[in-house]
Image (cartoon, rainbow, N blue to C red):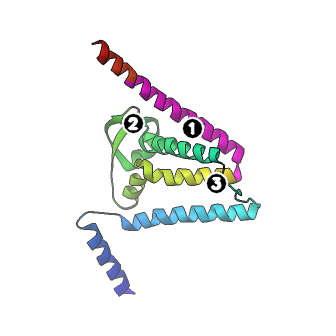
Amino acid sequence: MSELIESMREEQRRYEDGQHRPLKSYAAVMGLYGAAVAGLVALGRVTGRRLPEAVRPLDIALMAITTHKLARMIAKDPVTSPIRAPFTRYKGVSGPSELTEEVRGTGARKAVGELLTCPFCTAQWVATGYAAGLVFAPRFTRVAGTTMTAVAAADWLQLVYKRLLIQADETSG
């Protein structure tokens, strides 16, 4: 057993190449995600919930846009920075209503910080929550998805509007 453990440690050292990478903590985060999905599946079976026969195109669109918006809100929004603060350090503004933060700490703190500051990483969790919502509370989930989709569309319109103002200033100047 000790040979196996030492072999795993050696693989980790080779992988890290002198950089600290919290592989055990990443594995724990993946395990937590897997356990959450397994728990949702078990809860669905116990309560008699079934997966939909098909996912409607509108549900896919709402899920995609909601996932995008919520993942960015969790990972970048100034208002959600208290969630990230134990795992990050403020570095500045990176775009309209978005922050740049540096992940701090080691081990689990670093792994959670990387998850919470990465909209691509956070999106997996958000999409899974949305899918579970379609099984357990489809009406509420669709209303929440519609709301987040409207917020995302409003964000995009704000950016387009700002760009048009800049273009108008450049043209008139």
Residue furthest to the left in view is 18
CA neighbours of label 1 inside 10 A, class few (<14), some (14 to 19), many (20+): many
Q: Mark 3 or 1 closer to N-term? A: 3
Counting from the top left corner in percent of width and height, residue 127 is at 55, 51
Up-down: is 98 above or below 89? above
Q: CA distance from mark 2 to mark 1?
A: 17 Å
Q: Is residue 108 above or below residue 73?
A: below
Secondary-structure class at tag 2: strand
Residue drawn at x 36%, y 62% is: 107
Point out the image quarter for the N terminus.
Answer: bottom left
Q: Please name the residue shown 28% across and 63% down the image.
A: 20
Report the Cα–Cα distance between label 2 and label 3. Answer: 28 Å
What secondary structure is the magenta-colored segment mainly?
Answer: helix
Which residue is disc 3 drawn over? Answer: 132
Marked residue nearer the N-terminal end (2 or 1): 2
Mark number for residue 12?
A: none
In which quadrant of the rendered image does the C terminus lie?
A: top left
Horizontal side, residue 163 vs residue 51: left or right: left
Residue 98 is tagged as 2
Q: Residue at x 31, y 72 (%)?
A: 12
- Residue 166 coordinates in the image, percent (x, y): 34, 21
Say which mark, if any, is on residue 148. 1
Query: Pointer 3: residues within 10 angstroms few (<14), some, or many (20+)?
Result: some
Label 1 element class: helix
Q: Is residue 150 magenta?
A: yes
Residue type, mark 2 in image: Glu
| Lateral position of residue 169 relative to residue 37, left or right | left
Q: Which residues are magenta?
A: 136-163
